[in-house]
Amino acid sequence: MSLRPGIRRVIGSLLFLLSALSPAARGAENFEADLIVYGGTSSGVIAAVQAKQMGKSVIVVGPDKHLGGLSSGGLGYTDTGNKAVIGGLSRDFYHRIWKQYQSPDAWRWQKKSEYGNKGQGTPAIDGENRTMWIFEPHVAEQVFEDYVKEFQIPVHRDEWLDRSKGVKKEGERIRSITMLSGKTYTGKMFIDATYEGDLMAAAGVNYHVGREANSEYGEKWNGVQVGVLHHKHHFGAVKSKISPYVVPGDPKSGVLPRISTDPPGEYGTADKRVQAYCYRWCASNHPENRIPFPKPDGYDPKQYELLVRIFEAGWRETFEKFDDIPNRKTDTNNHGPFSTDNIGMNYDYPEASYERRKEILDEHRQYQQGWLYFVANDPRVPKVVQDEMRKWGLPKDEFKDNGNWPHQIYVREARRMIGQFVMTENELMKKKPTPDSVGMGSYTIDSHNVQRYITPEGYVQNEGDIGVGISPYSIAYGSLVPKKGQCENLVVTVCVSSTHIAFGSIRMEPVFMILGQSGATAAALAIDGNIPVQDVAYTALRERLLKDGQVLEHADSAKPKAEKVFISPESLPGVVVDDEQATLTGEWKSSSAGARYVGSGYRHDNAAKDGQASAEFAAKLPSAGRYEVRISSPPNTNRSSKVAVEVRAADGNHVVYVNQRKSPGNNETFQSLGVFEFAAGKPATVKVSNGNSDGYVVIDAVQWQKK
């Protein structure tokens, strides 16, 4: 029997309406568990494992296709700090990494004996404690996949939270969260383990983006840091000043790409800028596993004009952060004034729509791949640099479904919750006590550059790069939970409640795993007691955390570490020549481990004791006369006690032996070499060498003061 035309039209209209409805309206799938973890980062996976160990049902859901976030996304040269404070499941992760590398099959491109045992301060492979801290991306990802398989954790991938209307709350509790696909997840507790804090924001929890003013929490290293140059990722690390203009020195010619013309702001003030992102890309120099760097779509060599000028000024540190990981690969990070950090191009990422974020990610990938292609192929790159870069390429056996490029960008900072307790530099530096420890951090307070601007003198400079050494510190439970009255069944384990500069240390992957375990423990206890997360008894939480191997205190955590002192050469009297301006012979390694030094760091000869390393400091003195010559070299017991220093003066050459183990005292940085006569129009030179030394020879700065 055929339907009449009118009935067919009605049915057709109904079918069209049904097809136009959202998946949720059409009866999309619903899922339920005790705990819903949003985000498949390292923190999210560990949180889920802990929940299962406490007898709770759990689902991991999020936009990730690959588990582990940055830990499996290229950051294999782990930023650990003090490894003694890494406990619980975080340490178990690094134990499982160690187990993976016990198999001969794990060493495909390199013998284990050839890799050695390189690491950050301590060995990469700790056989005594059965841990390994440095690894390949695919090995880390396998460990995370093993976790969810072993603990039978459902993982729903490529699911994006509907940020506008996907969070359903009943009073102060999240009832469910719905994805753009229409899938809905109902739980008793929720954890936001994303780098962006999307669930936290959509749930109406207070948060901050950008840098707070120093005055807001009584800090020193927050806010705009114009004039502060800590590491070597600024233009002061280049021997000559660099013009930002298309025609050097001519503002009318226009500004080169990737330099802001906005004023940088006043020192210590707040802004909405966030520190730079980059991909921690993986390189290989094995001929059978190396893909030459591809030329990205839209490649524009003009974007890298600043790099040409840096090379022309003599800068040659391109490969300083090609950090070795197993199988002839690297975890490669930003290094220098114009490197893989895409400064200033991520300011709207934290709050951006998914579409806008994708544009930002694509632009970062294009910039970074273009940087690599430029160094490997542009004829203006020095041959010695280009020849070395061409030995490297993308590894065939990593990130196979993404063009051998990392699937996770390094979101160093996005949103940060303003929760029950705000972690600041004062807690990290022991100026104020930290209540209710749920884990520890210990890595240097570290911010990458935030902006690249034009100085009043007309030169280009970077701003925001900070490095302040600290000892282990506790992290407060209150920094994982929202303020009372905002949301009572949400725990935040990545975008924790902290200031910009405190987050600079907290934001390390081992810490995110620690906080994932502690956050899930608190969520499970809240479920058991049918109470808000803010009301979980700390005594019960602490007892369970200690039982599960978390480290909540450390012998060094009660003692403030001496704050580093960074002395600007321009602030010193007389004529000062920093090690950045010295003429070097032989091999010198950069360092900033000392507590007090001039400029952004100093150099040492790695205790070579071979007489092959020397450094010549040459000054142009304003007039002839008698000058006291002083030398700076951060002291330590491992230094040489007899460093040969030659002062070339008008009346001849004078050799002075310096004991670099001895401190000048009285908070002094320099020690005197003596007073010497210098002639007009002739160079004043000091030469330091490592011949006949009996320890590390260090070079930092030389100062001439007229008497």
Image: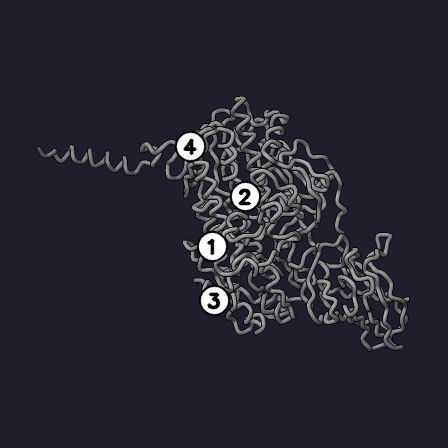
Q: Nearer the viewer, mark 1 or mark 3?
A: 1
| Residue drawn at x 79%, y 71% as measured from the top left | 687
Report x, y in % for residue 454: 64, 60
Q: How many marks?
A: 4
Tell me which amino acid carries mark 2: Phe
User: What residue is disc 4 on?
Assistant: 185
Label 2 SS: helix
Name which of mark 1 and mark 2 comes first in the sequence. Answer: 2
Tell me which amino acid carries mark 4: Tyr
User: What residue is disc 3 on?
Assistant: 287
Name which of mark 1 and mark 4 comes first in the sequence. Answer: 1
Q: Are there few (<14), some (14-19), or many (20+) residues within 10 Å of tag 1? A: few
Name which of mark 4 and mark 3 comes first in the sequence. Answer: 4
Tell me which amino acid carries mark 3: Pro
Label 1 SS: helix
User: What residue is disc 2 on?
Assistant: 93
Image position of 521 with respect to 638: above or below: above
Q: Between marks 2 and 4, how big is the CA–CA gap?
A: 28 Å
Report x, y in % for residue 186: 43, 29
Q: Nearer the viewer, mark 2 or mark 4?
A: 2
Q: Between marks 2 and 3, how big is the CA–CA gap?
A: 31 Å
Report x, y in % for residue 544: 59, 29
Left/right placement of residue 49 relative to residue 334 reads left
Left/right placement of residue 180 relative to residue 53 reads left
Mark linked to residue 105: 1
Does the image show residue 536? yes
Q: Between marks 1 and 4, how big is the CA–CA gap?
A: 40 Å
Label 3 SS: loop
